[in-house]
Image (cartoon, grey):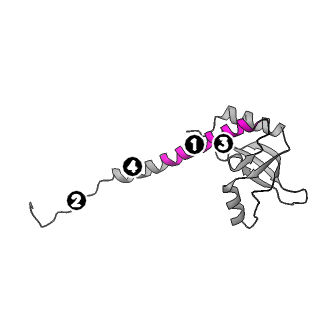
Amino acid sequence: MPIDDYASATLLSKQLDASVPFTVRPGKPLLKLMKEQGTPMSADRDYVVEKVMYSGDEGGIICMLQGAKTDKTVVGSSLTHLIIDPAHPLAEAVSAYRQQRTRQLKMQDQRGFTALAGQSASVKKKKKRSGGFGS
């Protein structure tokens, strides 16, 4: 089952790429990941999006970020892990995309867990005969 509506995701990524550069802030998942990798980011700092592209269902819409002009590292992040400036003209469309993609990913994870749980439940175990009553 596809996660994104391909046509709307590619259209949004093209619209965002046409509006580059714009500012975003990292969300909690990105902050945690970058801290674990030894390159911490600040939740209170604006990062400039330099490029936007669509990577399919695997990564969704990807934004390439750079902090200050002196930063030598460019970070690629899924749009779902970023907070876009509410004043951006596409902020509402980005919010809708994030909600839809997050919901689809959660549903996919639940189906995977349910499928695994259902598979293990369908394996029947042989009952042990006890030496007690009724044998």
Residue 98, numbered label = 3
What residue do we see at 47% from left, 51% from top?
A: 113
Q: Secondary structure at mark 4?
A: helix
The answer to whether the residues at label 1 and label 3 have Cβ atoms under 8 Å apart is: no
Of marks 1 and 2, the one in the foreground: 1
Q: Secondary structure at mark 1?
A: helix
The x, y position of residue 70, in whole percent, is 91, 60
Q: Is residue 97 left or right of residue 126?
A: right
Ranked by sequence position, the earlier of labels 1 and 2 is 1
Residue 103, numbered label = 1
Residue 118, numbered label = 4
Disc 3: CA contacts within 10 A as few (<14), some (14-19) or many (>=20): many
The answer to whether the residues at label 4 and label 3 have Cβ atoms under 8 Å apart is: no
Q: Is residue 27 left or right of residue 52?
A: left
Residue extent of the magenta highlight: 88-110
Q: Amino acid at mark 1?
A: Arg
What residue do we see at 66% from left, 42% from top?
A: 98
- Residue positioned most to the right: 70
Q: Amino acid at mark 2?
A: Lys
Residue 91 is one of the magenta-drawn residues: yes
Disc 1: CA contacts within 10 A as few (<14), some (14-19) or many (>=20): few
Of marks 4 and 1, the one in the foreground: 1
State the separation of the CA atoms marked 2 and 4: 20 Å
The x, y position of residue 24, in whole percent, is 78, 48
The answer to which quarter of the image holds residue 32 is bottom right
The answer to whether the residues at label 4 and label 1 have Cβ atoms under 8 Å apart is: no
The answer to which quarter of the image holds residue 60 is top right
Q: Amino acid at mark 4?
A: Gly
